[in-house]
Image: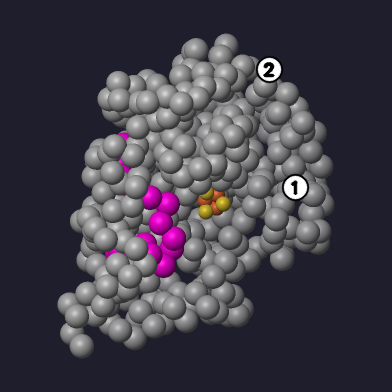
Amino acid sequence: MNLRERIEKLKDSLRRAGYEEFVKIETAHISGISYINIGEPGLEFLEDIAREELRTRTFTTCNPSCMCVEDLRTGTEEAEKQREIIDILKSIGVSTWLTCTPYEYMRIRKERYYAWSESSAVAFINSIFDAYTDKFPGPLTLISALTGEAPKTEILREEERYPRIIVEVDNDRRLGIVEAGILGMMIGSQYRGKLEIPYVKFRKTPFTSIEAIKSFLAAFSTFSNCPLVIMEGLSVNYRKYREKMCIECKLKIDMRDILSNLKDLSVRSSLKDLDDRSLVVIGCPHLSKNGVTRLIDVASSIMLRSHIWVFTCRFNKVTSSERRNIKVIYDTCLFVSSYIEDIKDKFDRIYTISLKQYYYLTKRVRDLEVLILVDKEIEEMLNNVSGSSLLVDV
Ligand code: F3S
């Protein structure tokens, strides 16, 4: 069977699964490539693809792995398996960027089709750039990468993207990273359905930084199955959506609701007060280049007893990845990493500023306390940080 026949066979199996129409995609982005998450079944699936000698037909990137590339040489079982996964991905043509924020390093075009599977990235490119992608499962994204086409699911049809819910946020100021995550969680857990697309109106300019926008969308997509939220003044094409939306229900959120959820879920502390058994994790989703640079500059001038781990993409490499108690780690994130096993003896608690990271870490980590940290210094360090290619054209 030649390549064309094999691809047709793959598409037939998708048609049998109920997907009738296919669209050409601009790029694909595969999640679930960490050996910690996919284990042997995932590796075997990739080995099958490699045996078929298939190649990607569109530019394809992938999510973080279970360790940084340098640690793949350590000879542990996880390192060997992860290396195998990365080698297979490379052999079929995947650009192994190992980041969950690929949109920061490529141009995303509005109203074009994509096949992406990382929920926070899907929510970001749909909501900010008006790109058309579903939150496709990892294996289906891989097949889309190999065929260059994705099934045209509901969210890829313009008429299905019109909001049906209006959310009015009575914010009296810009929301910081943790507050933005709380808001994302509140809206996401209220409207969990795939096509319950909210149109969010803010009283004042909504967010302090690009990191706060990422935090909002990551939390929203963690607590909801909906891959899209339209934000007035922020989403490309929001005017078109405002004209065409057909509102069925309304929700009002004021600052007091956000702050009371924040109080219930988080601890307020200062970096200086945390002890040496505390690990502060920053970079879910992966921190942008400007964020990394600023954090390293400012935090390394503070006398810290606690440790800060910053997770980011290798494209943001800094000259010195370890300064005092601050470490920049590339290609992975704590949740999908094998590092959790190593830190159990060193730390008693993990602090995060990401609602998404908090949600997943509390499910994975048993022996350490996981807390959401509200810290003025971190917020100030990342305030007004802009992403490299994230100038939003409204
Ligand atoms: Fe990215 Fe890991 Fe968070 S993949 S979105 S940093 S859980």
Question: Counting other residues with Cα less than 10 Å from the Cα at mark 1, is it few (<14), some (14-19), or many (20 or more)?
Answer: many
Identify the residue under disc 1: 370
Which residue range is magenta in the image?
A: 130-145
| Amino acid, disc 2 | Arg
Q: Image point 37% across, 20% down: which residue?
A: 233
Residue 374, percent from left and from top: 69, 31
Q: Is residue 134 magenta-colored?
A: yes
Label 2 residue SS: helix
State the quadrant of the N terminus.
bottom left
Identify the residue under disc 2: 256
Q: Nearer the viewer, mark 2 or mark 1?
A: 2
| Mark sitting earlier along the chain (2/1) | 2
- In the image, farthest residue toward the bottom: 1
Q: Image point 26% across, 61% down: which residue?
A: 20
Q: Is 269 displayed left or right of 353 in the figure?
A: right
| Amino acid, disc 1 | Val
Q: Image point 60% across, 62% down: which residue?
A: 337
Return the mark for residue 134: none
Residue 222, percent from left and from top: 56, 45
Q: Is residue 222 magenta-colored?
A: no
